[in-house]
Image (cartoon, rainbow, N blue to C red):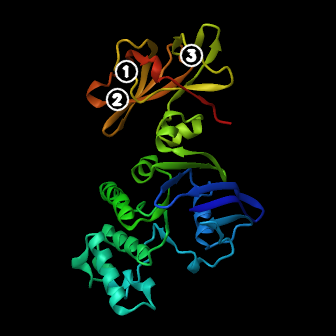
Amino acid sequence: MLTVAHIQHSYTQIPVLIDCHLTVAPAQRIAIIGPSGCGKSTLLRIIAGLEPGHSGTIRYDGIDITQQPAHQRRIGLMFQDHALFPHLSVAANIGYGLHGQAKSAIATRVESLLQLIGLPHLAQRFPDQLSGGERQRVALARSLAPSPRLLLLDEPFASLDRSLRDRLLDELPQWLSREGVAAIYVTHDANEACQIASDMLVMRAGRIVRQGSVASLYNDPQSQFVASLLGMPHSVAYIATKDGITTAFGDIAIPAPTSPARLLIPADVGIIRDTAVPVAYLHGVVSARFLRAPWQRLRITSVAGDAQFDYDMPQHLAPTIGTTVTLPIQLDRLTFVAGDD
């Protein structure tokens, strides 16, 4: 088990990591998400041993590896830039980190990984003869070749087109499971995080601000910042009253936090699954439409014109600009989050 505690780091006296803690169990897959510049990649580099943290400890199975050189940690690292050696064949690239082992053992391990990534027929090709997806597969196999106990992946598929990225994201968890390798996957894309991991850490300005299972973060994001990162960016301000809440789009008779907070607009607003559940209604006017394939994004403005939120719906159902709309929301789908600082 990896245990990271009290990691802090600065560049030219500017803090980039502040009191970071995390644990990774054997074979567990964790995703770290956050906006650019929040410290995700720096944290990975410190765990890998490529960069020393200014304070804090890193332990693996109870053994302190904080000062241990990177090549002794048995931690693999894969970046967006696959960095394959252009003068080596696919097989030689995969086996590069196995120098010192018997040739027969290297050949067996390389063949096993070629089968794992589905490229046994390309063993003798060179990197410039491969597609982008094939190169990323080879880079992954090379990272797995020394049998690391933990693999760190820093947005490895970011440069690939969407369809290829989705295919590799489907395959990666299977490869990791077959190898029995734990993984930390860094991304700014919540959909990628959900495909790869069962648990998630959210970083903001050098701090880990939330961590837990993917399901728990989606069901209770707790803040507008986390909700937005997870693909739930639409919310409205409200004022709590003795009878419920008042918004620019209508009143709702439901208890709510009195501290500064916002009401999330759920993605399934307008879908009534259970007629026995009480329903609230939001009223507004469609003030703009944007194509967000395969959806149509509507900008809903309050009747008074003093507030707005966006809502995605199927294109063939989207009303025209200027239409007055009423959106029902089941009360059991309402979620309140803290507003951003």
Secondary structure at numbered mark 2:
strand
Residue 184 x, y percent position in the rendering: 51, 60
Residue 138 x, y percent position in the rendering: 35, 74
Sequence-wise first label, 3 or 1: 3
| Three-letter amino acid code at the position of disc 3 | Thr
Residue 7 x, y percent position in the rendering: 70, 60
Secondary structure at numbered mark 1:
loop
- How dense is the environment of label 3, judged by Cα within 10 Å: few (below 14), some, or many (20 and up)? some
Secondary structure at numbered mark 3:
strand
Numbered mark located on residue 270 in the image? 1
Residue at 50% over, 70% down: 77
Residue indicated by mark 2: 313
Q: Are marks 2 and 3 in contact (CB under 8 Å)?
A: no
Q: Quadrant of the C terminus?
A: top right
Q: Which of marks 1 and 2 is in front?
A: 1
Residue 52 x, y percent position in the rendering: 68, 71
Which quadrant would residue 169 be assigned to in this image? Answer: bottom left
Q: Are marks 1 and 2 in contact (CB under 8 Å)?
A: yes
Q: Which of 322 and 191 is in front in this view?
A: 191
Residue indicated by mark 3: 247
Q: Nearer the viewer, residue 295 or 277?
A: 277
| Three-letter amino acid code at the position of disc 2 | Met
* Mark 2 to mark 3 CA distance (whole Å): 22 Å
Residue 322 visible in the current orientation: yes
Sequence-wise first label, 2 or 3: 3
| Three-letter amino acid code at the position of disc 1 | Gly
- How dense is the environment of label 2, judged by Cα within 10 Å: few (below 14), some, or many (20 and up)? some
Residue at 31% over, 59% down: 164
Which quadrant would residue 291 be assigned to in this image? Answer: top left
